[in-house]
Image (cartoon, helix red, strand yellow):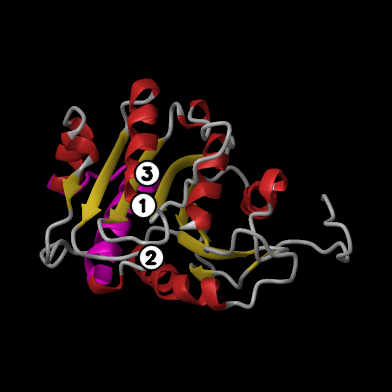
Amino acid sequence: MVAVSGARTRGARLSRAMGTGHGRTVRAVALLLPGGEVRGTRRPTGVHAAALWPLARHLARAGKEEGLTTHTVRYRYGGWNGDSAHPVQDTTWAADEVVRRYGDVPVCLVGMSMGARAALRVGGHAAVNSVVALSSWLPVVPEPEPVKQLVGRRVLMAHGTRDAEADPELSYRFAQRVKKVNPDICRFEVHSDGHTLYHHWAEVFALTTDFVMGTLFDRGFARPITDALAAPPPLGLRMPLASGFGRSIRV
């Protein structure tokens, strides 16, 4: 692994597994990728990871009988750190580690903010079959974010329309570029919500769970996801996430 000048080299880690246990076979894995900072060479404080634990638990409960295990990735460093893109390295390691531990099982990367950017970058890993990107942090840089690695993957994006930390328009433009090379992408807009999606967390949980279970276990999707995947842009990339989504869906 690449070391940051002045910092002691250390490894990324996976959190304790949630979900399968008591002799159940692991048939699929969801890797949760937390947010972070633009720059930071210290170990993450755990605040960003803790924000995803409720979603990790929710997914684990929903997929327990089918054999779903969830892990949260614990990065080496708290920041993206420019061209070093440390969360990308750590996510790649995590996907490799899943293969080492569980064998040839499908993986869904579920990222928030900086973690969403990492998930989209690592979506081309051989073990990954799908990506969920929430409140994607996709800053304007000299080179646009790559998209070809997402060919053959199913991708779900969701973004609050009042996000002041990660521009939702940039995630829409990214989704447009992905759609040109991969039809299997949809994007939902969470109206009146901000970066954390706190006010519509229940709907976001349901949306994410439906997509993860659908991609990892070949289930049918809820009608809004099916419609969003089938709709041409811009409709399928600006699909409103309805208040109360998922209340009638058993997960």
Q: Position of residue 55 (x, y in %)?
A: 39, 69
Q: Earlier in the sequence, mark 3 or mark 1?
A: 3
- Does the CB distance between marks 2 and 1 fall below 8 Å? yes
Q: Earlier in the sequence, mark 2 or mark 1?
A: 2
Query: Dividing the picture into quarters, in which one does residue 225 lie?
Result: top left
Residue located 46% across and 58% down the image:
113
Q: Secondary structure at mark 2?
A: helix
- Does the CB distance between marks 3 and 1 fall below 8 Å? no
Indicate the amino acid at tag 2: Leu
**Which residue bears the numbered disc 3?**
171
Instruction: Tell me the magenta residue range.
Output: 200-223
Q: Is residue 169 magenta?
A: no
Which of discs 2 and 3 lies nearer the camera? The answer is 3
Query: Dividing the picture into quarters, in which one does residue 241 lie?
Result: bottom left
Indicate the amino acid at tag 1: Val
**Which residue bears the numbered disc 2?**
59
Q: Secondary structure at mark 3?
A: helix
Real-space Cα distance between discs 2 and 3? 24 Å
Q: Is residue 216 magenta?
A: yes
Residue located 46% across and 74% down the image:
51
Frontmost residue, 113 versus 72: 113
**Which residue bears the numbered disc 1?**
212
Q: Secondary structure at mark 1?
A: helix
Indicate the amino acid at tag 3: Ser
Frontmost residue, 183 versus 27: 183
Image-based side of 33 in relation to 2, left or right: left
Q: Position of residue 179 (x, y in %)?
A: 33, 27
